[in-house]
């Protein structure tokens, strides 16, 4: 797949939909597996801090980062920054006004610098 073809609106939409599907599977697995752990933890009836709490907290922290990554990706941060860097690169590579050639320089006389040229 060429880089130009990877930026078509259809492919961007497909990547976004695939990303959403992966996020929804992650959320579904989180709810189902942690629900099972909590049911098992309560059925065992151990006193004190429940061990399922730690699994839920750590996995939830990872899920939070997955959700944040999905929202950031949705704002096309990578594409915007890529365009910004390319624009900066093109501006730096653009030729600036070059200094005048010796034949194009105007002679400096008493009216421009205040000093008369030698005879």
Image (tube, grey):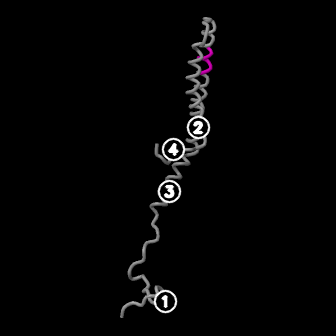
Looking at the rendering, the stretch of residues picked out in magenta corresponds to 30-35
Contact (CB < 8 A) between labels 3 and 4?
no
CA distance separating discs 1 and 3: 41 Å
User: Mark 3 or 4, which is nearer the eye?
Assistant: 3
Secondary element at tag 4: helix
User: Mark 1 or 4, which is nearer the eye?
Assistant: 1
Task: Point out the residue furthest to the front here.
Answer: 114
Residue 73: give x, y in percent of width and height: 57, 39
Q: Vertical placement of 117 versus 23: above or below?
A: below
Task: Point out the residue furthest to the left here.
Answer: 119
Secondary element at tag 1: loop
Question: Quick check: 2 left or right of 12?
Answer: left
List the residue tagged with mark 2. Answer: 16
List the residue tagged with mark 1. Answer: 111
Task: Point out the residue furthest to the bottom here.
Answer: 119
Mark 2: give few (<14), some (14-19) or many (20+) Cα within 10 Å: some
């Amino acid at each position: 797949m060429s880089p130009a073809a990877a930026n078509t609106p259809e492919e961007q939409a497909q990547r976004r939909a695939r990303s959403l599907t992966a996020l929804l599977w992650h959320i579904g697995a989180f709810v189902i597996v942690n629900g099972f752990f909590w049911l098992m933890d309560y059925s065992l009836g151990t006193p004190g801090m429940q061990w399922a709490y730690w699994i839920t907290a750590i996995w939830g922290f990872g899920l939070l980062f997955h959700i944040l990554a999905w929202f950031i990706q949705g704002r096309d941060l990578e594409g915007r920054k890529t365009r910004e860097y390319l624009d900066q690169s093109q501006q730096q590579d653009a030729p600036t006004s070059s200094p005048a050639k010796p034949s194009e320089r105007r002679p400096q006389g008493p009216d421009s610098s205040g000093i008369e040229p030698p005879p």
